[in-house]
Image (cartoon, grey):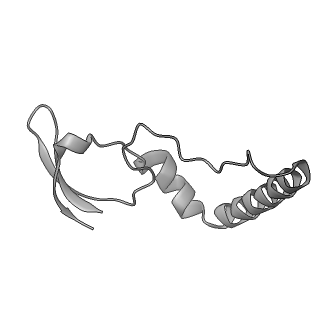
């Protein structure tokens, strides 16, 4: 997302970001309540395998990891203008 950000002190900057989490008061969850115990075990196993694969891919992209450590920032929704998605 590209946007203009205005800080509380009036400083203005042009930003370009990858949205990791949109502002919300709700949890996003995968509801397993109606699954059988066997189905839950399978979902948990698949979820762990998927996350393990993601970790392997993440390890290959050191640049992205470095960016996440140094450039991952939060922006107040009300201070964002001129959004170009």
x, y percentage for residue 39?
A: 85, 56
For the view shown, which residue lies furthest in the right direction? 38
Q: Quadrant of the N terminus?
A: bottom left
Name which residue lies at 14% across and 32% down. Answer: 8
Foreground of the two, 25 or 16:
25
Please name whichever residue, 3 or 56, is drawn nearer the observer in this view of the structure: 3
- Residue 54's x, y, as percent? 69, 62
Q: Position of residue 27 (x, y in %)?
A: 52, 41
Determine the residue located farthest toward the left in the rendered image.
10
Q: Residue furthest top?
A: 9
Percent across and percent down for residue 29 are 60, 47
Q: Quadrant location of residue 45?
A: bottom right
Which quarter of the image is occupied by the C terminus? bottom left
Residue at 11% over, 41% down: 11
Horizontally, residue 1 falls left or right of residue 27, namely left
The reply, left or right, for residue 49 in relation to residue 4 is right
Which residue occupies the foreground of this view, 13 or 38? 38
Q: What residue is drawn where x is 36% and y is 44%?
A: 23
Compared with 23, 57 (above or below) is below
The mark total stands at: 0
Asked if residue 67 is positioned above or below residue 11 in the image, the reply reads below
Determine which quarter of the picture holds residue 20.
bottom left
């Amino acid at each position: 997302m590209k946007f203009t950000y205005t800080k509380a002190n009036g400083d203005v900057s042009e930003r370009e970001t990858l949205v990791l989490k949109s502002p919300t008061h709700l949890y996003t969850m995968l509801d397993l309540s109606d699954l059988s115990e066997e189905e839950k075990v399978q979902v948990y196993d698949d979820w762990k395998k998927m996350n393990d694969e993601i970790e392997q891919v993440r390890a290959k992209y050191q640049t992205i990891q470095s960016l996440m450590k140094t450039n991952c920032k939060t922006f107040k929704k009300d201070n964002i203008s001129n959004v170009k998605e």
